[in-house]
Image (cartoon, grey):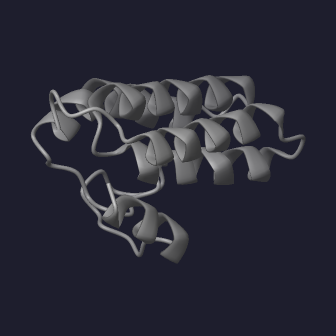
Amino acid sequence: MIGRPMPARVRAAYRAEMRAARTATEPEARWRHLERAHIISQPWPWPHTANHIAMFALAVAQHDRREAFGQVIRIIVAAPGSALSRYPEGNTGRARVSLTQPMPMPDDLAKLLQTA
C-alpha cells in the first residue's frame, strides 16, 4: 500500500489501540491491544513497523527473550511485507504465531478494514 494513506477512520482505530496498549495496567491487556493494532496496521508499512517496535519494547520490559527476538525479525520484514501486500490477514503479530499464518479476524476489525 505504498503511497496509499491510511484512511482517517482506520488511523483513529489504530491510534486508539496503541494508546490503550500504553495505558493498560495488565500485561495481557497491553498485548491484546497491540495485537488488535497489528491487525489494523498490516496493510500500511510504517504503522505496521511501529506496532512491532512497540511489541518489542513490551517484550523487553517483560524480559521475554523469545518474544523480543521474534519481534526483531518482524520489525525487519514488516515494511516490505506490507508494501508488497504479502502479510497474513488477521495475524496477531506475536512471536508465538508463525509469520505466515493467517488467523480469523475479529468482526469489528474486518468491517473497519473492509471499508478502507
The relative height of residue 32 versus residue 25 in the rendered view (above or below) is: below
Q: Is residue 87 left or right of residue 15?
A: left
Residue 40 vs 22, above or below: the answer is below
Above or below for 67 versus 73: below
> Residue 6, relative to residue 42: is it above or below?
above
Most extreme residue toward the right, as rendered?
A: 25
User: Residue 46, can we see it?
Assistant: yes
Quadrant in the rendering for residue 54: top right
Which residue is at a point 47% across and 55% down the rendered structure image? 92
Residue at horizontal 64 percent and vertical 44 percent from the top = 17
Viewer-nearest residue: 28 or 79: 79
Q: Taking the image as drawn, is residue 93 in sight? A: no
Q: Is residue 111 left or right of residue 3?
A: right
Q: Is residue 52 left or right of residue 48?
A: right
- Estimate the x, y position of residue 25 in percent, counting from the top left: 90, 40
> Horizontal and vertical percent for residue 10?
46, 47
Q: Residue at x 46, y 25 (%)?
A: 50
Name the quarter where the C terminus is drawn. Answer: bottom left
In the picture, which quadrant includes the N terminus? top left
Q: Quadrant of residue 105?
A: bottom left
The reply, left or right, for residue 78 in relation to residue 69 is left
Q: Position of residue 91 (x, y in %)?
A: 39, 59
- Count the labels in the image: 0
Task: Please tell me which residue is depicted at 30% across the width and 67% down the height of the picture.
Answer: 102
The one of 25 and 56 positioned closer to us in this rendering: 25
- Outermost residue on the left side: it is 84
Whole-percent x and y of residue 4?
20, 34
